[in-house]
Image (cartoon, grey):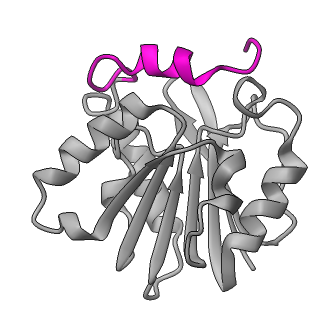
């Protein structure tokens, strides 16, 4: 876990398709299943996926409109290519932006925010409080926020009502899945 990674470093990483190996790794199918199983069963108008990468999780999320946001323009390019092949492609919208830019993106209130693998020091430094405030403001009243992170690397907690906290094995780590409600 080094210093804060730059957009250029992430774009270099995303030069090839699926650099994390999500498509082939069985733990990543389990990860998506755990996340979806934890969601309250209800309709979602606008969903936001922060740290969407190539859309591996994004394309599984409910919502009439789903917005994927990632710092890497290269990752967003892969997500847009994948979206173009889908019959429901009109549901998906992608933006290359920092998590710190989210309050200025002019997004409609989100009924569901999903954030996976982003809230680590190499990506956000010590700025969790600013992220908490920005995401809480984006979340619609009664909205759901889901956070999924490697438990050994994640030391934060949102200032929302926590509904679920669940740990499960993920690759050589343990994931912490939390569901919050505004």
Q: Residue at x 59, y 60 (%)?
A: 105
x, y percent for residue 73: 42, 33
As displayed, is residue 102 above or below residue 96? below
Left or right? Give the position of 131 relative to 6: right
Residue 167 drawn in magenta: no
> Residue at 66% of width from left, 20% of height from top?
5
Please say whether residue 170 is visible from this viewpoint: yes
Secondary structure, magenta segment, majority class: loop
Q: Residue 108: percent from the left, percent from the top?
A: 56, 77
**x and y percent of residue 40 in the render?**
53, 79
From what the image shows, is residue 27 above or below residue 92?
A: above
Q: Which residues are magenta?
A: 1-20
Image height of 129 relative to 44, above or below: above
Q: Residue at x 47, y 77 (%)?
A: 46
Do we see residue 178 in this rendering? Answer: no
Task: Quarter of the image for the C terminus: give it.
Answer: bottom right
Identified at 39% across, 53% down, the residue is 94
Quarter assignment of residue 132: bottom right
Vertical placement of 145 versus 127: above or below?
below
Q: Tag count in the figure?
A: 0
Is 73 displayed left or right of 2 in the figure?
Answer: left
Q: Quadrant of the N terminus?
A: top right
Residue 78 point in image, percent of width and height: 28, 36
In the drawing, does residue 27 fall left or right of residue 147?
A: left
Instruction: Please tell me which residue lies in front, 68 or 143.
Output: 68
Q: Is residue 156 left or right of residue 62?
A: right
């Amino acid at each position: 876990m080094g210093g804060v990674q730059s957009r250029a470093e992430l774009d270099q990483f995303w030069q090839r398709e699926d650099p994390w190996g999500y498509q082939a790794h069985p733990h990543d199918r389990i990860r998506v299943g755990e996340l979806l199983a934890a969601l309250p069963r209800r309709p979602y108008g606008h969903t936001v996926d922060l740290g969407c990468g190539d859309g591996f999780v994004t394309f599984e999320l409910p919502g009439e409109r789903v917005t994927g946001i990632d710092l890497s323009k290269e990752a967003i390019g892969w997500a847009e290519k994948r979206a173009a092949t889908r019959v429901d492609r009109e549901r998906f919208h992608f933006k290359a932006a920092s998590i710190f830019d989210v309050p200025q993106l002019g997004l409609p209130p989100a009924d569901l925010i999903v954030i996976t693998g982003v809230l680590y020091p190499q990506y956000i430094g010590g700025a969790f409080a600013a992220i908490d405030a920005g995401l809480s403001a984006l979340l619609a009243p009664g909205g759901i926020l889901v956070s999924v992170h490697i438990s050994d690397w994640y030391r934060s907690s949102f200032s929302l009502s926590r509904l679920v906290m669940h740990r499960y094995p993920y690759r050589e780590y343990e994931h912490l899945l939390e569901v919050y409600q505004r």
